Amino acid sequence: MGAMKSCSITLVIVLLFNLCCFGKAADHQDQEGLGASFIFGDSLVDAGNNNYLPTLSKANIAPNGIDFKASKGTPTGRYTNGRTIGDIVGEELGAPNYAVPFLSPNSTGKAILYGVNYASGGGGIMNATGRIFVNRLGMDIQIDYFNITRKQFDKLLGPSKARDYIMKKSIFSITIGANDFLNNYLLPVLSVGARLSESPDAFIDDMLSHFRTQLTRLYQLDARKFVIGNVGPIGCIPYQKTINQLKEDECVELPNKLALRYNARLKDLLAQLNENLPGATFVHANVYDLVLDLITNYKQHGFITASRACCGNGGQFAGIIPCGPTSSMCAERSKHVFWDPYHPSEAANLIIAKKLLYGDTKCISPMNLKQLRDH
């Protein structure tokens, strides 16, 4: 689950540049197009890290991954029927393979030079986020793990070339924040005390203070090209619509209000970091509006529903029980905006990814991902 992460989707996003053969990378660091994609975040972009954790948030069970061609339809730990937004972006930019999950046994040697994925279903900016799942990798731990990778790059390429490769040619995509609301602040069982003692603005202050520290820490580890997805319309996911017994065209007001408040402040934070961290580029991916457009105008985008989960059980929109072997599954997976109660389908991910890659500043600013790659 890990809840429709950032933008329900939000956005992520991977980038490997036009990779040619990597064997020559160590000798030809000035070659154009080479680079690694480092992916941080939640279940929107988890590519299998939670497979290796004792956690209640897992997606390595059928029918998840049924349309993922690279695994011939077997589950990989991705919380969707096919590719994530990060997978699609990497392919569009010429990546030869997907960023390897950090906890995977094959995240060693030259495999990491294409990129590493640290994302974890249930993870958030705040360390308490997602504790309902028992285990998950929060953002602080994900950065701890990148610090390990950073040292491995020094050994693989030598310190000087490694620094150049990471600073100039690699992209850091971060899709996080939705769980901090869905599985922390808004979770009745765990957070009623927190909500009594902390106002929404105080909680968002706390989130952004932590996030500023986390992004600055990545900068100190030589990250320079960042893509940050804002939080999507989390009040519109099938789970929220189902438990609140809403009509098809309604969304839950409070989660969306919280997301919008956080998103406005996030945009200000990224502008400050662009000003204050020399040589860094922080790109803001407006996942909220992209996903809301898909939900509001789903018919124009070729979908038959933006309310009902394709794979799930319970309630009007199949939004209570996560996708698994006993779930009911829709006949037309490419015609549903949502794959499960929380996460978008591959068809929705494809539309969002193309907007982030090639869209204008309403979707992604100050530049799109194609431009960031070449920046």
Image (cartoon, rainbow, N blue to C red):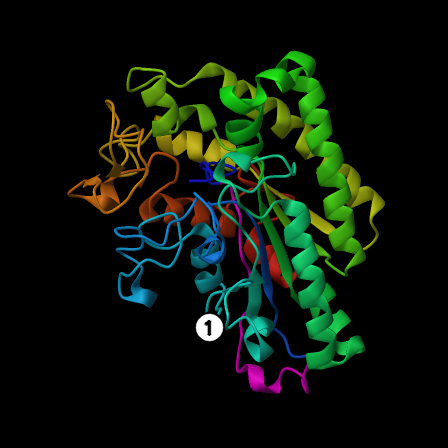
* Mark 1 secondary-structure assignment: loop
Dominant SS of magenta comes to: loop
Q: In terms of depth relative to the viewer, which is nearer, 342 or 298? A: 342
* The magenta segment: 10-30
Read off the residue under disc 1.
96
Side (left or right) of 131 relative to 204? left
Three-letter amino acid code of the residue under disc 1: Pro
Residue at point 79%, 38% (across, down): 272
Quarter assignment of residue 321: top left
Residue at point 84%, 44% (across, down): 276
Position of residue 47 measured from the top left corner of the image (x, y, whole percent): 45, 56
Q: Is residue 250 magenta?
A: no
Position of residue 181 measured from the top left corner of the image (x, y, whole percent): 55, 27
Indicate whether 130 appears above or below 354: above
Q: In terms of depth relative to the viewer, which is nearer, 240 or 277? A: 240
Is residue 190 visible in the rendered image? The answer is yes
In the rendered image, which quarter contains the N terminus? top left
Side (left or right) of 184 relative to 281? left
